[in-house]
Image: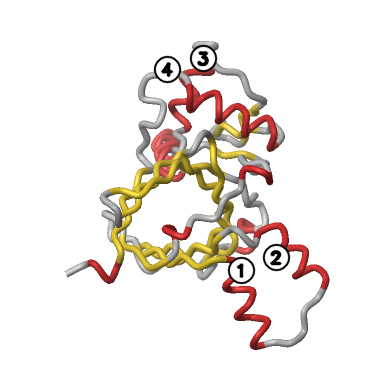
Amino acid sequence: MKSKITFLFACLVILNSCIVKSLNPFYIPEAIKFQQAFLGEWQDDDKGVWKIVSVKQAYLQETREDSKTNKEDLEKMKKYGKGYFVSYVRKEQEAWFLAMPFIIEDEVFMDFVPYHYDSKGTNDLVSQHLLKTHSVAKFKVVDGKNLEIIWLDEDRLETLFKENKIKIKHEKVGFDESLLLTASSEELYHFLKKYNASDVANKWKSDEKFTLIPVHAKP
């Protein structure tokens, strides 16, 4: 029995993501700014493939193929038109995200939220328990062609919470007590602005860091 419990804890450590998760988006509408450089097909340093299209482009393509446009679609287009649909494929498993770009003091950030994932082989009862939370990553162009994406790290924030160096509404959820930010988008945005300007050491050190290389540029 003890070995089974030990194995369970080991699985929880493996499955628990290291990125900071939030109930609400990290951006405010007035900070959204479309980034042309994010579009295209990319490969990361872990052999993952990323395909990124604009929500507006996808919407226009769909309306050309289907003349029926309802009010709900128009509202979504208005709200997310400056964002992207991001397909991420790794080890033959595909997931889709909605990513929204926003600016803080001339630096670019991305708010990610799951849009759809490959549920083949997933227990339906399990999938109904999963909550689509938001995450945030810092984004920049490197060497004029590659992209660097760094997610805000959960372990880093956990340490700062324990040292009483930061304050933002949060809860510990689940058996593994994952960190979940519960603040409003306005509070999250201003927290991120203050955090990014702070002198906190290694504030953007993260295990979830990707360098994306354009597929057409690969040999």
Are discs 1 and 2 less than 8 Å apart at CB? yes
Residue at the spot of label 3: 162
**Residue 88 image position (x, y, % from top left):** 43, 62
Residue at the spot of label 4: 199
Cα distance between the residues tagged 1 and 4: 38 Å
Residue at the spot of label 1: 56
Residue name at image x 75 percent, y 70 percent: 73
Q: Nearer the viewer, residue 86 or 128?
A: 86
| Colour mode of the rendering | secondary structure
Which one is closest to the eye, mark 4 or mark 3?
4
Which disc, if any, is residue 77? 2
> Mark 3 or 2 closer to N-term?
2
Label 4: which secondary element: loop
Q: Residue furthest left?
A: 219
**Residue 22 image position (x, y, % from top left):** 61, 39
In the image, what residue type sits under mark 2? Met
> Mark 1 or 2 closer to N-term?
1
Q: Is residue 185 left or right of residue 143?
A: right
Please determine whether, in this image, residue 69 is positioned above or below residue 91.
below
Q: Is residue 77 left or right of residue 16?
A: right
In the image, what residue type sits under mark 1? Lys
Which one is closest to the eye, mark 3 or mark 1?
1
Residue name at image x 65 percent, y 86 percent: 64
**Residue 13 image position (x, y, % from top left):** 42, 38
Are discs 3 and 2 less than 8 Å apart at CB? no
> Mark 3 or 1 closer to N-term?
1
In the image, what residue type sits under mark 4? Asp
